[in-house]
Image (tube, rainbow, N blue to C red):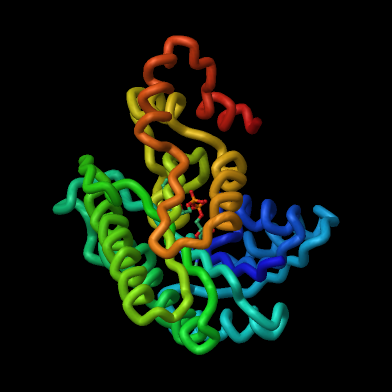
Amino acid sequence: MKNVVITGSARGLGLEMAKVFIKQGHNVVISDVNNENLEKAMKVLDEMNVEGNAYSCYCDITNYEDIQNLISFAKDKMQTIDIWINNAGVNQSDKAIWELEERDISKVIDIDLKGTMLCSNAIMKEFDKSKSGAIYNVEGYGSNDAKMLGLSIYGTSKRAVTYFTDALAKECETRANGVIIGKLSPGIMITDFITNSLGNGEKIELSEKTKKVYNILGDYPDVVADFLVKGMLKNTKNGTRIEWLTSGKAARRFMFSAFNKRDFFNALEEGK
Ligand SMILES: NC(=O)c1ccc[n+]([C@@H]2O[C@H](COP(=O)([O-])OP(=O)(O)OC[C@H]3O[C@@H](n4cnc5c(N)ncnc54)[C@H](O)[C@@H]3O)[C@@H](O)[C@H]2O)c1
């Protein structure tokens, strides 16, 4: 049985991972900057009536005190923390770099990159003492150096998250402190993230071409969460990357795209 903390888990991938963990008898602390969604999420988890326990704690990952409170809360409820997942993230507005406001750039970097660093720093202080624990950081567009108009700041932060995670894994290996570090690569998921900038900022209008690609390559977050959680529970190696949408899988999906009947966006509009 594992004790797990997931940042940004009031909805989307984070919440779906929490569901998979508790279904399998593990304990989870969900946390988020959005209190209203956190309450709704907690209700959903409570109603699941499964073996694992779920707890919720407010945490803005850009605030170091909040992160320390989250660690204390999790230790108080579960005694130990075995897996920490840095999942919280925001998308950017679909704009060129020079069209963005200074605060938009800061927000994406502060949450997606600096927040991941601050959480890793704080939880590593715990794990280094206990000589055990695992940290998983969530990658995203740009992690593999791909570039696209309208995703430059987000892509920069995720590219840096990948570098940072590799660097942290190397430091753990060198210090032989028994802690494992890994990366989660969720591919493309049909969540609020893809149609909202900066958390719940302006709506992002996806072009028909983008929707077509998402219909081929995308998945609902529960499917991805199931795969990622299984990967984390199995993993014992430092530096592992758990990847949902491999290049082989993407190539196969494009190859058979003529038979693809999925229309996530129509389903969203119909409230399915
Ligand atoms: N949706 C995709 O296609 C996709 C693809 C690749 C990677 N990702 C990554 O997966 C992760 C989860 O994405 P999602 O699609 O579930 O997004 P989501 O928007 O559904 O969920 C993100 C959660 O993070 C929370 N959050 C935002 N700022 C925060 C802060 N300062 N402190 C704490 N929580 C905060 C939000 O309130 C939200 O509940 C993100 O890191 C994202 O970059 C998403």
Residue 25, picture quadrant? bottom right
251 versus 67 height, above or below: above
What residue is drawn where x is 42% and y is 64%?
A: 238
Residue 255: give x, y in percent of width and height.
38, 16
Describe residue 115's horizontal placement relative to residue 145 as left or right. Answer: right
Residue 6, picture quadrant? bottom right
Q: Is residue 33 visible?
A: no
55 versus 154 height, above or below: below
Q: Residue furthest right?
A: 49
Q: Residue furthest bottom?
A: 129
What residue is drawn where x is 36% and y is 50%?
A: 140
Query: 82 or 87: nearer the eye?
Result: 82
Residue 123: give x, y in percent of width and height.
48, 80
Residue 102: give x, y in percent of width and height.
22, 65
Q: Residue furthest top?
A: 258
Query: 234 or 199: nearer the eye?
Result: 234
Number of numbered discs present? 0
Quarter occupied by the N terminus: bottom right
176 versus 202 height, above or below: below
Quarter occupied by the C terminus: top right
Describe residue 194's horizontal placement relative to residue 132 as left or right. Answer: left
What residue is drawn where x is 46% and y is 85%?
A: 128
Describe residue 174's horizontal placement relative to residue 69 as left or right. Answer: left
Q: Is residue 153 visible?
A: yes
Residue 68: give x, y in percent of width and height.
52, 85
Describe residue 96's horizontal placement relative to residue 121 as left or right. Answer: left
What residue is drawn where x is 43% and y is 37%?
A: 245
